[in-house]
């Protein structure tokens, strides 16, 4: 409906960019709600430690529950990190301990789901436009074949990777927290990406702590960092442009503008 759902340490709120007004959905000290970037049947999905999963409908929270097959279920310490929409009402919820695999059932608030755990931590997950799913585990990238089965796609031989993103050309972007570097896999060729920016006559190479990526409808790649703002990569440009707005927490687009949420530095609207 053209509104943003925003989370803070103590509240969940709604922002209307046409009026510039905020409205509180719920508020509680130490709430730390997790708002997922993908939508669940065109509605925001939220997770909170004390109440679990809820769909946001207007200013209401509609609770949903999972019933796990074969009594295999996540541990009580499982923290969901990402919701992935695979089309045909099929979704994955990823956390370090594994993946919840389920289908949306419109007339039921209890969803049949399967729990898939792995030998290593599931660091990150993403899918391409054909809904092929890729997992990041240790130094390796895997494909997710369904029913808990994975296949090795490539060993990057680089430790401390922390995020994965697949763009519209099916290139795989990987960020590395330990080395503060970015890598890309194109047609199974692994390469390092240098973030080159220009400030006047000076050219700098930046080594940021990258936390996530975003692609807009003009095929620009936005690289979100923990402290160095956001970088924009245009496929026909050699250099990256930079918005130095601090610690990025989320990014999305609306009405040909990029909206960026930060830590302790507000909500920003950027031109493409």
Image (cartoon, helix red, strand yellow):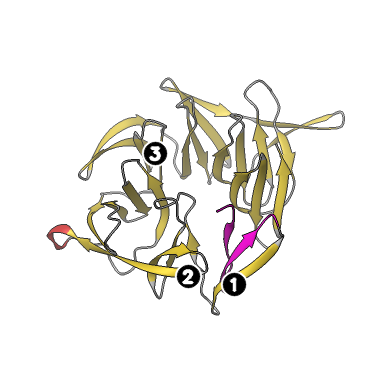
Sequence-wise, which precedes: disc 2 or disc 1? 1
Task: Choose the circle earlier in sequence order: 1 or 3.
Answer: 1
- Residue denoted by label 2: 60
Q: CA distance from mark 1 to mark 3?
A: 41 Å
Where's residue 187, x and y in %?
Answer: 43, 20
Indicate yes or no whether the magenta region holds residue 13: yes
Tell me if residue 34 comes above or below residue 83 in the rendering: below
Q: Is residue 8 positioned above or below 3 on the image?
A: below
Q: Earlier in the sequence, mark 3 or mark 2?
A: 2
Count neighbours of disc 1 (C-alpha within 10 A) and say few if under 14, some if 14 to 19, many if 20 or more.
Answer: few
Question: Disc 1 on helix, strand or loop?
Answer: strand
- Mark 1 sits on what residue? 24
Q: Is residue 121 visible?
A: no
Among the 4 quarters of the image, the one containing residue 148: top left
Q: Residue furthest left?
A: 70
Q: Give the camera-side residue of 166 and 151.
A: 166
From the top left corner, tell me how far across and down residue 182 is, in percent.
Answer: 55, 35
Q: Secondary structure at mark 2?
A: strand
Q: Are the residues at dot 2 and dot 1 in contact (C-beta closer than 8 Å)?
A: no
Name the secondary structure under disc 3: loop
> Where does label 3 land, which residue?
139
Name the residue at the bottom extreme: 29
CA separation in Å, label 2 and label 1: 10 Å
**What segment is highlighted magenta in the picture?**
1-18
């Amino acid at each position: 409906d053209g509104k943003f759902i925003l989370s803070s340490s103590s509240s969940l709120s709604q922002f209307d960019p046409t009026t510039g007004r905020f409205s509180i959905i719920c508020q509680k000290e130490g709430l730390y709600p997790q708002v997922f970037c993908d939508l669940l049947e065109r509605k925001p999905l939220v997770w909170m430690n004390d109440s679990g999963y809820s769909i946001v409908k207007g200013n209401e929270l509609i609770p949903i529950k999972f019933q796990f097959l074969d009594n295999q279920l996540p541990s009580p310490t499982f923290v969901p990190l990402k919701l992935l929409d695979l089309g045909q009402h099929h979704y994955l919820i990823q956390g370090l301990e594994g993946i919840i695999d389920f289908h949306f059932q419109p007339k039921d608030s209890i969803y049949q789901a399967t729990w898939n755990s792995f030998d290593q931590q599931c660091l990150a997950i993403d899918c391409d436009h054909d809904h092929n799913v890729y997992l990041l585990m240790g130094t390796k990238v895997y494909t997710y074949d369904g029913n808990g089965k994975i296949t090795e796609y490539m060993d990057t031989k680089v430790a401390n990777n922390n995020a994965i993103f697949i763009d519209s050309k099916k290139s795989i972007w990987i960020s590395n927290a330990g080395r503060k570097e970015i890598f890309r896999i194109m047609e199974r060729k692994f390469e390092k990406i240098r973030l080159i920016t220009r400030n006047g006559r000076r050219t700098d190479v930046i080594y940021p702590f990258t936390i996530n990526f975003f692609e807009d409808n003009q095929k620009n790649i936005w690289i979100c960092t923990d402290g160095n703002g956001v970088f924009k990569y245009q496929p026909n440009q050699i250099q990256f442009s930079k918005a130095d707005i601090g610690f990025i927490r989320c990014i999305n687009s609306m009405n040909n503008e990029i909206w960026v949420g930060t830590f302790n530095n507000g909500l920003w609207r950027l031109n493409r």
